[in-house]
Amino acid sequence: MQDKIFSSKKHLTKSTKSKILNNYLGSYYKGNYVWGGAMNLAWNELNDEILHEKLKLATKDKIALEMVSKLNDSPFSKKDLDEESCYIKAGYGQKTVDKINKELREKFPEKSFQDLDLQLDPKDIISYAYLFKKVEYKTQFKKDDVLFNGKKVKGFIADNEAQRENIKIIKYENDDKFIIKLQLKDKNDELILAKGYDMTNPQIVVEEINKNNKEYLSTIDESDRFEAPKLHLNYHRDYVELIGKYLSNRNFTDYLIGKMFENIKFDMNEEGARVENEAVIAVLKTTSFGPKKHKEFILNKPYWVIMKRRNSQNPYFILGVNNSELMEK
């Protein structure tokens, strides 16, 4: 079997532990909650185009089953995106991987993620999704240092009337609890900022936005202030809770989730915001075998030399080679 190595729970770290919150299956990275829609797109494509039903796991693991339930019942789908900003494909074998790499480069020349480096057998399954959005504010803000939790950081502010016109008020209760929308050049996208809401439950603020995001909103006044920090995120997540689990769907009971990961990049500054998100699910047929992986036995890093007699368990010479001092120059 081709290098099919599966992660286990012992590799789960604080930065990748799942936090299941209502309809969103996000995780925490350096203490910040992260969720992107690509994994839901890849999961839906696997269900719709390959399994032809919702994915089922042959496990009693409560965390894994809860995650599958959230992914199966997520409200987010490709209907929530424009076709120009996403790419989704599911299929069998290496030919599908190669097709994904080719078509993705053609559709998204700005893509920063590397091509998929997977070696699949003909009956293995790949489901992939990628989304890319780059938005600009209607008027660029001014760079400036700002404070966040009492610490000075790089950021941007609104220091003139044109910049203040960028900011629409969705809801304001006080200076520590509000929701605002930053006006974008492309009116088909929205960038919304909310302060003062439960930071463990994104569903609450999403519902509050949907309830108050009217067509006509007022802008901030001349005496009002706006400051925001610049943001940069580069995040990789392995879904270790599901990797290695067998499916129980009819005709797929000899398949297991071999790889499941996502990459998310996000930047927000005085000019606008950029989000890039990809998700990969590789479902492997456990009875399939491919050509042996090419091996290399190159002693180009520290190594041991041990000498012993064939009929003895005890070496008579041991050398640990840690540098090139013993080698001929």
Image: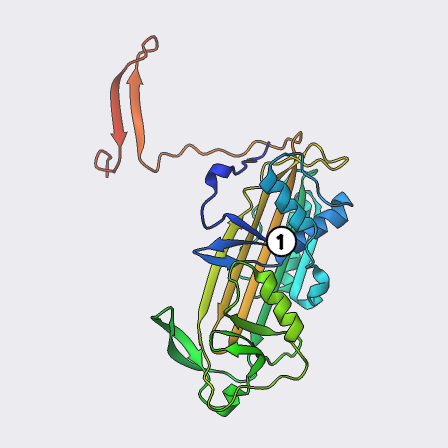
323 to the left or right of 263: left
Toward the viewer: 247 or 64?
A: 64
Residue occupying the point 65% across, 66% down: 85
Where residue 106 appears, x then y in whole percent?
A: 64, 62
| Quadrant assignment for the C terminus | top left
Location of mark 1 (residue): 39
The secondary element bearing badge 1 is classed as: helix
Q: Residues within 10 Å of mark 1 (few under 14, many from 20)?
A: many
Q: Residue furthest left?
A: 325
Where residue 242 appears, x then y in whole percent?
A: 59, 41
Above/below status of 157 relative to 296: below
Residue 137, by quadrant, is: bottom right
Residue 189, by quadrant, is: bottom right
Residue occupying the point 26% across, 35% down: 322
Residue occupying the point 66% across, 72% down: 211
Residue occupying the point 54% across, 34% down: 293
Q: Amino acid at mark 1?
A: Met
| Quadrant assignment for the N terminus | top right
